[in-house]
Amino acid sequence: SAVISQKPSRDICQRGTSLTIQCQVDSQVTMMFWYRQQPGQSLTLIATANQGSEATYESGFVIDKFPISRPNLTFSTLTVSNMSPEDSSIYLCSVRGNSGNTIYFGEGSWLTVV
Amino acid sequence: SQQGEEDPQALSIQEGENATMNCSYKTSINNLQWYRQNSGRGLVHLILIRSNEREKHSGRLRVTLDTSKKSSSLLITASRAADTASYFCATDRYNFNKFYFGSGTKLNVKP
């Protein structure tokens, strides 16, 4: 398994500002994923972040709104840009285990936009 | 959701009873996994079943997979109040290296 730390765990943000979420893994992993979970909803995949290449975004998500960095095999950031109340969600970082079949999650970053 | 639906959306049972949750998905898969989430926290991996497997057990958990119907079920036997959580299935689409989640079942186990 992998231990994943996310920062911040919780924040209240002003409308129109941007916030960067950090994800640190205790081992080197190839594939990292960012998910959004809106209140009372399931997880929606935002993008896949592989080291050394541009992030791949799912339909409905764009780089200008959710820029992602993946500078090395243990770290990634997701920025939520120009936030609106609709962006209030839990943002979860996850990694694919080196066995390839299981994904592991951080505790999530709970953002409230006011 | 991006991949499928789960039912029921919510389930309330008494401690000691069994809880069954169902997951349906849309595309061919390599694996299906079940996760638990407590109160909006991170997800905990429970069990993985491969597309060539039909049933798998882990402690009080029993998972079945029917690829012809594109569906899976999670059975929790002898439930406990600590099992109260939301449960999600996740699939990795065949030949895609990413995971999509079902809509989830919110389980409440009353002591």
Image (cartoon, coloured by chain):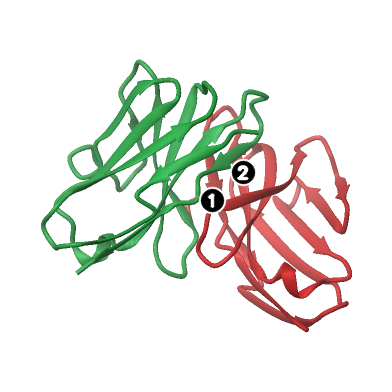
Q: Chain of mark 1?
A: B
Q: Across the whole image, how many numbered discs are drawn on residues?
A: 2
Among the chains pictured, the one given red colouring is: B
Q: Marks 2 and 1, Cα distance to the nearest angstrom?
A: 8 Å
In the rendered structure, find residue B43 and report the number of the disc placed on it. Answer: none
Q: Residue at x 81, y 35 (%)?
A: B52
Relative to residue B76, is residue A27 depicted above or below?
Answer: above
Q: Chain of mark 2?
A: B
Residue B5 sits in which quadrant?
Answer: bottom right
Residue A52 sits in which quadrant?
Answer: top left
- The answer to whether marks 2 and 1 sit on the same chain is yes
Q: Judge by depth and name the residue closer to the eye, B47 or B42.
A: B42
Numbered disc 2: secondary structure: strand
Kindly identify which residue carries mark 2: B91
Q: Residue at x 53, y 50 (%)?
A: B3
In the displayed structure image, the side of residue A21 where residue B57 appears, left or right? right
Label 1 CA crowd tier, 10 Å (few <14, some 14–19, many 20+) = some
Amino acid at pointer 2: Thr
Kindly identify which residue carries mark 1: B3
Q: Residue at x 41, y 68 (%)?
A: A39
Colour assignment, chain A: green
Amino acid at pointer 1: Gln
